[in-house]
């Protein structure tokens, strides 16, 4: 086996310069992990990591993998929380750190073309100079790559208004499992929409590198709203947050964001940043409105008047410094959690359930009960406007019994999401962590996914062990209850 690996590394050095082929143990270690607790518990080392700079290089690498039957995994920044970019079965990891160019920005036609390794925040910083932005807005936006976002159909707080990454991918250059290169969305197209043929672009979006490897992306971008404001509202009863959001919908108002902080999250943030002076209640909503300066000034007061019907207290943040301070606090929940629970760590194991908006109160209440039943500390917050309920599970990872109970909690949370008509992952992807729930969530549709996988990757070499798509794979036993 060692000889075979050495031979593959040697052949890869015939494709790439030697300094872009990594096979030393120390160099490989960073690629054995992502942000998931799953990857932190057992090291899954790739055999070799390659850093291509062109599509031709990626295609040559994939052809070599196909000839030798070597698994191959595409990787962006490794910020994923489900093991999606970890080489579960060894093989070659293609890291896109050297493919991060913005190839074109077309303001008039509202699109740009990028390589997959561009970091989301860097893309938006460049687009801002053209008065544009790429909306999906993941929480890891300062680190995650656009290719990883597309592979996982990522999103974030602004999905309630702007939607998920899928809505903004117009086309892609894709290297298939045999090394063939195709362009989806029209080989020469610059159109913003198409009903021509089967939509192959959407097939690859969210497939987590199991069907092909993205090497170029044509993305829809939007004019950047010049102004925004936030309404902060506290509620004594969790159910009133749903009623308040429905009141906004009934008034014809679609906020840019509607973020929920459960009292557990508020307590953590106030311990960390008491200067925030967040209002107390069973839940707090951050409701953001955006548009022109004039429209925002009027809209934010209308929103405040509507939410005041059910809220115990409301507050406005209209200057940009105050708004950024609130969002920085929302993004600092991990730090706040560490301060509130010294000696424990936030783990990513069941953190991005998505349920119908009407089911959020029942989901959070039942999830709290499960946390108490298992004796595991858990904080709740989420992208309320589209039903994304995040759970911050906090444990001592060196305590085997606490780890066992955290596993039970995560399992029960995933099942709860399916039970109430939701999904086990709203934005972070399936990866290896949630593969066991695919049959329960999708039923016979999983068999169709597997047939697509077999058609495009008959050897099963592209990101094996993910999404429960392995050709010929038997279902994992998922007991009831």
Image (spheres, rainbow, N blue to C red):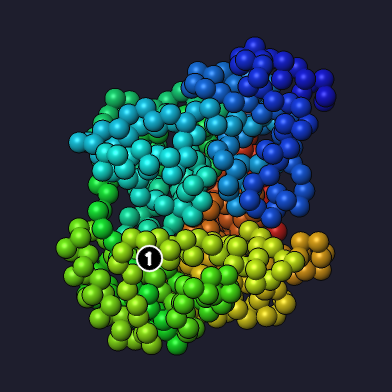
Which type of secondary structure does the marked residue at label 1 adopt?
helix
Along the line of sight, which residue is nearer the eye, 413 or 476? 413
- Up the image or down, 401 lies above or below 474; here it is below
As drawn, 60 above or below 384:
above
Q: In this view, does 270 lie to the left or right of 377?
A: left
Around disc 1, counting alpha carbons within 10 Å, would you say few (fewer than 14), some (14 to 19), or many (20 or more)? some
7 sits to left or right of 99: right
Q: Name the spot of residue 79 as percent of width and height, x first.
A: 58, 47
- Residue occupying the point 59% across, 32% down: 95
Residue 246 location, x and y as percent?
Answer: 31, 76
Q: Mark 1 points at which residue?
A: 322
Q: Kindly identify the residue that appears in the image at 47 percent across and 72 percent down.
A: 276
Check the picture and name the quadrant holding the N terminus. Answer: top right
Residue 279, position as x, y percentages in the image: 44, 81
Name the residue: 38% across, 78% down.
Answer: 233
Question: For the C terminus, which image quadrant?
Answer: bottom right
Q: Is residue 471 visible?
A: no
Quarter of the image where one finds residue 217: top left
Q: Quadrant of residue 290?
A: bottom left
Q: In the rendering, at what x and y percent does residue 168 appear?
A: 34, 44
Residue 32 vs 97, above or below: the answer is below
The residue under the point 77% across, 69% down is 402
**In the image, is residue 182 above or below residue 364?**
above
């Amino acid at each position: 086996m060692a000889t075979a690996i050495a031979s593959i590394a040697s052949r890869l050095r015939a494709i790439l310069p030697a300094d872009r082929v990594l096979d030393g143990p120390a160099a490989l270690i960073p690629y054995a992990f992502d942000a998931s607790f799953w990857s932190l518990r057992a090291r899954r080392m790739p055999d070799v990591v390659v850093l291509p700079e062109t599509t031709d290089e990626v295609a040559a690498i994939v052809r070599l993998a196909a000839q030798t039957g070597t698994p191959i995994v595409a990787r962006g920044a490794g910020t994923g929380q489900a093991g999606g970019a970890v080489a579960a079965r060894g093989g070659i990891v293609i890291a896109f750190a050297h493919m991060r160019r913005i190839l074109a920005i077309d303001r008039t036609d509202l699109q740009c073309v990028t390589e997959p390794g561009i970091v989301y925040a860097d893309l938006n910083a460049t687009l801002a100079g053209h008065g544009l932005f790429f909306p999906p807005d993941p929480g890891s936006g300062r680190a995650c790559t656009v290719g990883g976002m597309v592979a996982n159909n990522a999103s974030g707080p602004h999905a309630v208004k702007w939607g998920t990454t899928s809505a903004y991918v117009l086309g892609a250059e894709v290297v298939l499992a045999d090394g063939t290169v195709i362009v989806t969305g029209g080989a020469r197209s610059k159109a913003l929409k198409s009903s021509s043929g089967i939509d192959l672009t959407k097939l690859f979006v969210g497939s987590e590198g199991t069907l092909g490897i993205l090497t170029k992306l044509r993305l829809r971008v939007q004019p950047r709203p010049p102004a925004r404001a936030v309404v902060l509202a506290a509620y004594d009863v969790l159910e009133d947050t749903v009623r308040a959001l429905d009141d906004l919908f009934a008034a014809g108002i679609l906020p840019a964001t509607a973020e929920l902080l459960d009292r557990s999250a508020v307590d953590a943030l106030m311990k960390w940043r008491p200067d925030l002076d967040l209002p107390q209640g069973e839940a707090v909503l951050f409701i953001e409105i955006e548009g022109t300066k004039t429209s925002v000034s009027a809209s934010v007061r209308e929103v405040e008047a509507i939410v005041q019907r059910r809220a115990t207290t409301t507050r406005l943040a209209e200057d940009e410094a105050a708004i950024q301070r609130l969002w920085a606090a929302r993004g600092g929940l991990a730090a706040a959690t560490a301060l509130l629970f010294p000696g424990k760590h936030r783990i990513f194991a069941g953190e991005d359930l998505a349920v119908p908006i009407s089911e959020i109160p029942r989901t959070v209440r039942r999830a709290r009960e499960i946390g108490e039943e298992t004796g595991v500390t858990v904080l709740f917050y989420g992208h309320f406007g589209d039903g994304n309920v995040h759970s911050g599970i906090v444990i001592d990872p060196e305590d085997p019994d606490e780890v066992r109970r955290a596993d039970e909690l995560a399992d029960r949370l995933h099942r709860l999401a399916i039970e109430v008509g939701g999904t086990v992952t709203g934005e972070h992807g399936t990866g290896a962590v949630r593969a066991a729930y695919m049959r329960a969530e999708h039923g016979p549709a999983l068999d169709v996914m597997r047939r697509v996988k077999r058609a495009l990757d008959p050897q099963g070499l592209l990101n094996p062990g993910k999404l429960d798509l392995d050709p010929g794979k038997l279902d994992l036993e998922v007991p009831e209850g």
